[in-house]
């Protein structure tokens, strides 16, 4: 009888310990992660310095701004390639909407996607050192969408460390 | 003869004093100033947080990004109108250029104008509290161009404290 109690309490203790660890890990980072890469939306990216705007033709018909963290901006300013580990780039996109106040202008309409590139040459060695994330309304897009990232970047901007955006001066 | 020397040295002293003052003032701020308003390109604006991108149809055919200083961004985030004194907004503009690397995209080409709005409700009381500056290659545009700023802003965005740009979320 006493042995049964010992086993019972020991099992209970292990369960509580594991549950606490899971909870603690969950508290550390509950943010949505992209499939394949596990990339998250970085904290505070809306306040980051912009690298350049862009426009995407119909059917997407979007206005975009790409921003970078401090590591990214230093690399851009120094003209340094490849980008160092810790570089994070974020592209914010909106539907292009005609301005109701000034006829020749288009302005951001509804937000569409937020796309993230994270440089970690070890973790993402199989994809040129870059991890990719595509988010819609704060949630990650599906795996099929993430399968297209690396191939398109590799096919078009291999000579610029897989990064399309240049610093707009 | 002695009187002549006294007058000569006195005049020389005054000249040197005035020249030194002019030099000192020049050292304090030699930046180009817009006509009418005396607005300058603010230090470090390229690193400021962006408010929104915009696109301008042909013939200008431009991509633009509007950035704001800390006072501006706080007002935007708080949804505060009118903007407080000390608000500075800067619009950077580039010719829209087709991307050579990704067909549906347009990216910044040559830089065109940098346009500045400075809120100072006393100094610019006659123009809704705003001073305007338009710069091309770091030099101010002419007075005729600056005569058009206030009327266009007043005619189109009177209800948004003469500011076109909204914060893109």
Image (cartoon, coloured by chain):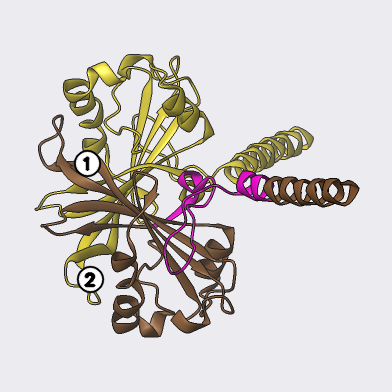
Chain colours: A brown, B yellow
Q: Quadrant of residue A58?
A: bottom left
Q: Position of residue B46 (x, y in %)?
A: 46, 51
Are the residues tagged 1 and 2 within 8 Å (C-beta)? no
Quadrant including the C terminus of chain B: top left
Q: Secondary structure at mark 2?
A: loop
Q: Secondary structure at mark 1?
A: strand
Left/right placement of residue A98 relative to residue B146 reads left
Chain of the residue on which disc 2 is drawn: B
Q: Position of residue B121 (x, y in %)?
A: 43, 16
Left/right placement of residue A14 relative to residue A78 reads right
> What residue is drawn where x is 68% and y is 35%?
B14
Q: Position of residue A36 (x, y in %)?
A: 43, 69
Quadrant including the N terminus of chain B: top right
> What residue is drawn where x is 69% and y is 37%?
B17
Chain of the residue on which disc 1 is drawn: A
Q: Which mark is residue A90?
A: none
Q: Which residue is mark 1?
A: A107
CA gap, disc 1 and disc 2: 20 Å
Q: Which residue is mark 2?
A: B99
């Amino acid at each position: 009888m006493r042995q049964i109690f010992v086993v019972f309490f020991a099992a209970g203790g292990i369960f509580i310990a594991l549950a606490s660890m899971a909870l603690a890990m969950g508290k550390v980072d509950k943010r949505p992660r992209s499939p394949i890469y596990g990339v998250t939306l970085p904290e505070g990216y809306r306040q980051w310095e912009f690298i350049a705007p862009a426009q995407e033709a119909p059917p997407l018909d979007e206005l975009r701004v790409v921003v970078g963290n401090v590591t990214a901006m230093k690399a851009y300013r120094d003209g340094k390639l490849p980008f160092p580990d810790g570089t994070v780039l974020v592209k914010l996109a909106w539907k292009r909407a005609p301005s109701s106040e000034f006829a020749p202008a288009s302005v951001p309409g509804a937000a569409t996607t937020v796309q993230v590139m994270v440089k970690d040459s070890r973790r993402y060695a199989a994809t040129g050192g870059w991890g990719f994330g595509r988010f819609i309304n704060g949630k990650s897009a599906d795996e099929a969408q993430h399968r297209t990232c690396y191939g398109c970047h590799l096919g078009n901007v291999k000579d610029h460390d897989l990064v399309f955006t240049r610093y707009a001066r």
